[in-house]
Image (cartoon, coloured by chain):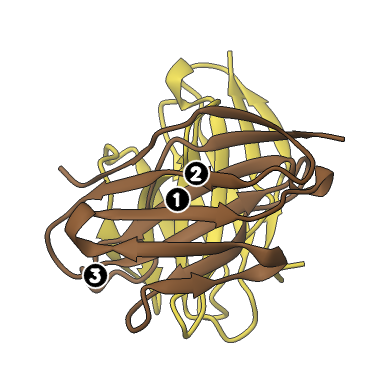
Chain colours: A yellow, B brown
Amino acid sequence: ETGVTQSPTHLIKTRGQQVTLRCSSQSGHNTVSWYQQALGQGPQFIFQYYREEENGRGNFPPRFSGLQFPNYSSELNVNALELDDSALYLCASVGATGELFFGEGSRLTVL
Amino acid sequence: AQSVSQHNHHVILSEAASLELGCNYSYGGTVNLFWYVQYPGQHLQLLLKYFSGDPLVKGIKGFEAEFIKSKFSFNLRKPSVQWSDTAEYFCAVNPGSGNTGKLIFGQGTTLQVKP
């Protein structure tokens, strides 16, 4: 158990729709990162939030956005879904030693 | 661009065989290095990490890795694998940009250990 929980675990959307994925971080961790893991690939960094501000972003378009709340839980929002957005989305809270604690992910299928 | 390359995509070993998984990264500055493992049906978890100091680091379950700066490598080893080591293994690099939550992952190596 990592103490990081994600919801929903699975969901199916159609092209053009919007989706919100949620993450509850490990207690005391004020930094959260989101990753996209396509089938057969390693996770790709989407962005990082620290104390409710985005402070790092990977090579993802602006339709990928996020929020972090005062209790350090967070959301990943994806607008105008495309077929290639089908993937496992991972949330990770960052420990004081730099270790990332991953949730089990939300598997998104876009039809 | 920064990248991480894992040489083996799929490795099949018998129990008690020795394991070495290769990992190379492309980044010239200070890096923090990680190996993560994902057992079937479970979340990613840390095997070991290197930040500084002794380049030979030991992790959980008998795994170790050696950082060779001149070769930009961080290979994972285990002298004798067990069936329970069947999993996907990811090498990852934090390029020391100050974004502690940003890791660049390799594409992963699937290890299958036959009993």
Q: Residues within 10 Å of mark 2 (few under 14, many from 20)?
A: many
Q: Earlier in the sequence, mark 2 or mark 1?
A: 2
Q: Residue at x 53, y 76 (%)?
A: A72
Does the CB distance between marks 2 and 1 fall below 8 Å?
yes
| Mark 3, secondary structure of its residue | loop
Out of B101 and B20, give the one closest to the viewer: B20
Residue B96: which disc? 3
Q: Chain of mark 1?
A: B
Using residue A88 as the reference point, say whether residue A81 is left or right of it.
left
Q: Earlier in the sequence, mark 3 or mark 1?
A: 1
Type of amino acid under label 2? Leu
Q: Nearer the viewer, mark 2 or mark 1?
A: 2
Type of amino acid under label 3? Gly
Residue B91: which disc? 1
Residue A95 rendering spot, x and y as whole percentages: 51, 79
Type of amino acid under label 1? Cys
Q: Residues within 10 Å of mark 3 (few under 14, many from 20)?
A: some
Q: Residues within 10 Å of mark 1 (few under 14, many from 20)?
A: many
Out of A13 and B58, give the one closest to the viewer: B58
Q: Nearer the viewer, mark 3 or mark 2?
A: 2
| Mark 1, secondary structure of its residue | strand
Q: Residue at x 39, y 66 (%)?
A: B101
Q: Which residue is mark 2?
A: B21
* In the rendered image, residues at marks 3 and 1 fall on the same chain: yes
Residue A36 visible somewhere in the drawing: yes
